[in-house]
Amino acid sequence: MARRAVIIGAGITGSLVAWRLARAGWNVTVVEARHVGAGSSSRTAAGIRQQFSTPETVLGMRFAVDFYRRFREEVGGDTVPIVQNGYLFLYALQEDWDAAKYRVQMQQACGLDDVAALEVQALVERFPWVDRHAVLGGTFCPTDGFLRPETVYNEAIAAARRLGADIVQNAPVTGVEASGGRIDAVLTPKGRFPADLVFDCTNAWSPRLAQVLGATPLPIAPRKRYLWMVERAGSMTGPELAAMPLTVSPSGAYCRPENEDSLLMGWAHDAPEEPAFTYEDQDRIEEAFFHRSGPDSYGYATWMSLAEVLPPIGEFAGITATTGGYYAVTPDHNPFLGYDPAVANLVRLVGFSGHGAMFGPFTARVAEALAEAGRDVATIDLLGHAAELETFRIGRRYGHGEKLVI
Ligand SMILES: Cc1cc2nc3c(=O)[nH]c(=O)nc-3n(C[C@H](O)[C@H](O)[C@H](O)COP(=O)(O)OP(=O)(O)OC[C@H]3O[C@@H](n4cnc5c(N)ncnc54)[C@H](O)[C@@H]3O)c2cc1C
């Protein structure tokens, strides 16, 4: 009889893991507290980049970009979920620019051949909307870009269903039956689901779910993040806007096209840890961040910070929307991908620190390897390279944190 996997949470992580395990022959049940995409996966900027400071993540995101390009053939559906406009990081301080150029060498050594460090002349020739006096240079990778997240989770769930997976919505996990340090069954108001292997794919909810599962408490802080939509004006044409890469200013404010008429912006800001946030809190907009609060709001500060390096954007018509959602932040901004030390048949795939949409295919690949092995593994093969998994292990030391966090 096929082994039974119960996957808790149906965001990008849970849906891709469900598809991957169903394809590998597991008998898969997904239990989701609300509905598919009820969490951060429907509230994300969905950037995907291979430009990271951690070599394993560069490799993992190369795998993810390749997977998302082949998504229709592998998973199904009509839409390619990745828009490869590239990612452009801009730098204004010599120290930061030197470090960025050094990182590019590391990324190239990890096989990311198309990333380049552009000195200011080459940069403004390629991207004339960058103010040459505001930056020293930038790193650009044309195969980076952003995702259509709803395509990812909806198509992955549909594909998992076609492979026989059972998707149970409105089924919050409220308890478990456990014996001998293992979970025998997962309990929800919609029924009892026996399991050989359980996957925690609840990201920002994971600290709370851990208590229900009797799992190890992991240092994951749910923190609010906002996005704003800005309406285009005549300073850029629609096609020019639609072709823009996801651009990160020296301040860390970032933007990317949503379509020919709208620019999406974000900026990491201080946010308290909210361990008990509710589903409704995801869409609660604090006054200081709400664009209708006027020019003193954080949305306007983000817009103006981008305008300092991207002058045509400063001439756009105005902010039209503010949205929110939760990051699940870990001490080193790397996720936890591994077996729980306290529960022998529980795999935690959580703590994505603002990177979970792009991590999805890599996470699912790791999940499959862990399921096959029945224990943590040191490396997995990705694109012909051995990717080290120590960076993502539960219980690791937090010495080598990811430096490129936005
Ligand atoms: C503003 C913002 C910008 C972002 N930008 C990017 C970006 O540019 N690139 C990127 O890669 N990532 C980005 N992220 C992060 C990314 O969205 C997340 O890391 C990713 O969506 C996590 O997916 P997930 O499936 O792991 O979790 P989620 O999508 O949050 O799904 C978790 C699911 O678990 C369910 N659940 C919770 N508790 C239970 C329970 N007890 N029982 C059953 N089900 C339960 C929830 O209902 C939810 O559906 C951003 C996030 C935000 C908020």
Image (spheres, helix red, strand yellow):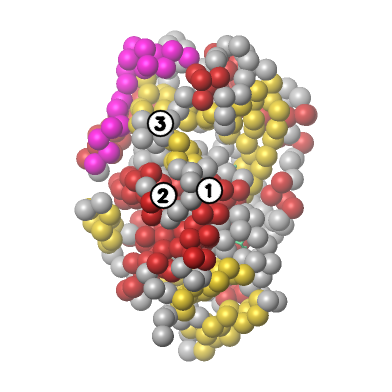
Could you say whether the residue bearing mark 2 is in a helix, strand or loop? Answer: helix
Q: Is residue 101 left or right of residue 92?
A: left
- Which percent across, then down, holds residue 197? 46, 77
Above/below status of 161 relative to 302: below
Q: Nearer the viewer, residue 2 or 180?
A: 2
| Gap in angstroms between the C-alphas marked 1 and 3 | 20 Å
Q: Which residue is located at x 53 percent, y 60 percent?
A: 157
Q: Which residue is located at x 47 percent, y 24 percent?
A: 243
| Amino acid residing under circle 1 | Thr
Of mark 2 and mark 1, the one earlier in the sequence is 2
Q: Is residue 42 left or right of residue 348?
A: right
Q: Which residue is located at x 44 percent, y 13 percent?
A: 128
- Which percent across, then down, holds residue 113? 25, 35
Could you say whether the residue bearing mark 1 is in a helix, strand or loop? Answer: helix
Q: Which of labels 1 and 3 is toward the front?
A: 1
Which numbered marker is on residue 71? 2
